[in-house]
Amino acid sequence: MNVKLRLITTGVLFFTGQALIAQTVNKDTIPKEKQIEEVIVTGYQKKSKDEIAQAQSVVTAEELKTQIPTTSVGNMLQGRASGVFSQSRNGQPGSTAEINIRGISGLIGNSEPLYIVDGIYMTSRQFNAVNPNDIESVVILKDAAGTSQYGSRGANGVVVITTKKGRNGKTQYSFESRLGFSKKISDKELNFEMMNSTQKLQYEKEMRNLGLSGLPSYTAADEEALKKLDHDWQKDILRTSSLQSYIFSARGGSDKNKFYYSLGYDKDEGIVRDINGFDRYTGRFNFENNLSDKLKVGLDLGISYQYTENVRDRNNVQSPFGAMYRYNPFEPVYNSDGSYNFNLRQGLNIIEALRNNLDSEQRLRATGNIFGEYKINDALSYRMYFNTLYDNLVNTNNLKRGSQLDIIINGAAGLGSLRKTTFYSFNYIYGNRIDFKKQFNDHYVGATALVEFNNEFTENIIASGTNYKNPNSDAPSNTIPSDKNTFTGDKVRSTLFSLLGLAEYNYKKKYILTASIRQDKSSKFGENNKSGIFWSGSVAWNIGKEDFLNGGFLNDLKLRASYGTTGNDRNIPNFANVGYVAYGDYGSGANMTPTIITGNPDIKWETNKTTNLGVDFAFFKSRFRGAIEVYRSDRNDFIQLLPLPYESGNYAIYKNLGDMRTEGLETEFTFDIIRKENLKLSLRGNGSLPRAKILSLDGVSTQRNLGETALKVGETPYFYRLVEYAGVNAADGKALYYTDRQNPNAGENFYTVNGRTATDTYNATADIKDITDKSPLPKFFGGFGLSLEAYGFDLSADFTFKTGGYTYNYQTQLLQSSASRANNMSLDAFNYWKNPGDTDVLPKPTAVGLRASDQFLEKSDYLRFRTLMIGYTFNKKVLGEDVPLNSIRMYVQAQNLLTWTSFKGDPEVAVGSGENQLLAGQTFVSGSFALFSYPAVRQFMFGVQVEF
């Protein structure tokens, strides 16, 4: 394909990954084909699009603008890139996204990718502090040709973020303001409704008539009085949240100096009353200076301060989201005298708890990047850089003296307690690199050599006190004397020393070869495996540049192939390579139970060997363009904690055991249906079909059970392991469950249902089964959307979807089970067996209620109208030359407008119950169960952007 370029002053400059993208558009080609050449990131290097031989997806600043810039950048990536499965952990303001690149990355542990912001390594939570408005682009590296450059950290994929930089030309100022609101998506939209007072009293009457105990009896007058107390606890606990966002920025420069700076503020009150959900202040400044024709220096600084007030996200009434469903609608918030009503069936008044049991976080993050680059000659350059990340978190939990929970915990007098947790982290990277780039007629040769040292230091301190001696202190500090003070903490320092070599060759950009090799030496690993070597190789053939394809309907065609190895050090616990003893409190007394870890000098990183085949294409004057990828990843040496024989004591050891294979197909496309100067219409879409299979576990066992999920050799990871529900016996209303047992026990009856044996006696030990075809992992996911520009107006709409995954719906089970009859119930609880012959109903209510089975294993398929944005731009032609403004853009945005799903609840939330799932040490599997987590919200925003 012949590319014709003409640099013009209105060309667009933006960044991708760690490198500048320069797009130059020849205006003469509109409405003809745009002639564009892009320079994009490929890891540590930058290349033109024609030179790329790896699998990667690019999301630009313009694409991110179509998403509501909430407080999480990760959530904005949802549905934007093939192979990238992103969903909110929950709806809490500031919540991070759960992102998996090409499926889960381990048997047990962390599957999050490596995040790199302007060369600085970050966790997902640290990455979440970056203001979305400061991002120029996001590049997702997916195959070994891209990820192996990051060696022992690249096995889960790499997300490379570049923030905005200065550029040549007159200084451009921009101010953007957004105001809006958010509210919980209604239960009715999510396929269930709760009972009101009349309905709940009727349900209780029916339960008493069935002989179920534990419910009070009411006279007719009592019932009428209770009905008058009817109210919706959701309205008492939740509110419509207000949203605010402001960002001011400036960018400009000359051939010698370039700069960018910004100041931002974001606020999301959150939907829980009395709780200030989220406040964030951000600032960024970067500067580049060409001291001479050969020497360039630069400085990049970023800072973020974040204040968050938290609510309990657990399976009890300390969670407002559990309380608002469990409390009965005839139970008032306040007594007649205005005092809190503590005579609730659940025992705790959540309104009082939200006001008097306070939990807040203050987080300060600062990043710095300084570099110097010397151009030795036209082909050779040297660069030195120093990157830093400072992260400080202070969490304060204040249980006010005399509050209801204080009395429950500390006795009738009430003592009050304070708990503070501080986390401090300082990371730095010092690197030196030499780059060689030379064009020999039609041959191009490039090479990079790099040496890098990374030092990470973290410190945690936890301090608490009870019964403070100062009775007038509303918010005591830990320095105030108390009856009981406790202190604990830890310090950890780890280092990584790396050597990296990159090489590339191409002939006329038709035939491309690239290679990389990296050695990492890490302090995290055993003495016998400190060092690891990771490598990759890739080839590409730009068939579109061959003469025999010139001039046809096929404008571009590139075949790519790559293979390589990467590692994963995310699942390495601290001190796994040395022996230690860990203690934890047992109960409220002085007894301590030790956990003894035997050090393993052979412990090493998990590894990933990846094969990738891809094709890039463009048809019909590049109106229709896209890519198709197929891949196979063989993951080995998973780090697992294995108990030693019981006779040896409470010992355990970390070992590298287990293998898994992931395969998949990915595709993405863009179709410019209309491409005229004042009218443009484009469609876009992507889809991913991942598959995973366990190849081995620990070399001895073939299955490991993890509660409601399991791992088994030869099967999909985390398939469900449950008793199978066979429906209701239409004759007597008893629940039936499939069994493989041959003979019934005493008092048990067997039946034939759908050609299988079923029992009316629940037996979780004998009848539990592997449901290997159902797991939380989606079998197909992606997104699609459209963009329209017409005479100053613009419209963008995006949809996301997933299918093939399942979620265990504990929430539905609890809201329908007669065991929860003292609490409020879902209206579906009325649909139980009443008469012989009833079908498609719940079993006849019993004291034990509905049992755990695949009755509540629901498809979590959904199609969600994720975002809609409509705007209008008043440009210079409309404003006139006398107005000192370049443009004014006004727009409205909406998020989570509609959801199509059969799931009862929100099918997207990744974390079912944060404290039960993330903090209790359980194996975390995204979307494995639903249980009263912070709900997803619908958002609306109005924004104005002024450029001058």
Image: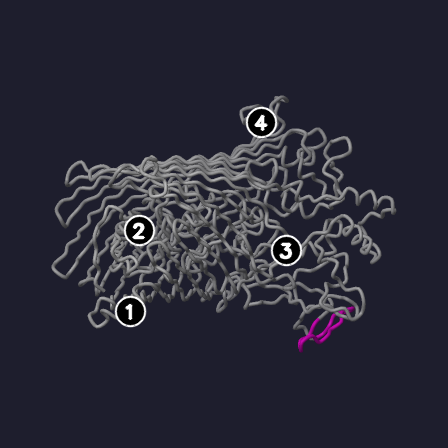
Between marks 2 and 3 in the image, the one whose residue lies nearer the viewer: 3
* Residue 746, x across and y down, in percent: 77, 69
Q: Which residue is mark 1?
A: 554
Which of the numbered marks, if any, corresponds to residue 520?
2
- Which numbered disc flags the more N-terminal residue, 2 or 3? 2
Q: Name the image quarter holding the N terminus.
A: bottom left
Over which residues does the magenta segment extend?
743-758
The residue sitting at 14% across, 56% down in the picture is 439
The answer to whether 47 is drawn above or below residue 334 in the figure is below
Amino acid at pointer 2: Asp
The answer to whether 18 is drawn above or below residue 403 in the figure is below
As measured in the structure, the alpha-carbon distance from the residue carrying label 2 to the one carrying label 3 is 44 Å
Residue 191 visible in this rendered orientation of the protein = yes
Q: Which residue is mark 3?
A: 810
Q: Are marks 3 and 4 in contact (CB under 8 Å)?
A: no
* Mark 4 crowd level (few <14, some 14–19, many ≥20, 10 Å Cα): some
Which of the numbered marks, if any, corresponds to residue 846?
none
Is residue 695 covered in magenta? Answer: no
Residue 300 visible in this rendered orientation of the protein = no
* Foreground residue among 287 and 939: 939
Residue 231: quarter of image: top right
Between marks 4 and 1 in the image, the one whose residue lies nearer the viewer: 1
* Residue 268, x across and y down, in percent: 52, 39
* Residue 928, x across and y down, in percent: 55, 57
The residue sitting at 26% across, 71% down in the picture is 552
As measured in the structure, the alpha-carbon distance from the residue carrying label 1 to the one carrying label 2 is 43 Å
* Foreground residue among 270 and 303: 270
Amino acid at pointer 3: Tyr
Q: Which residue is mark 4?
A: 475
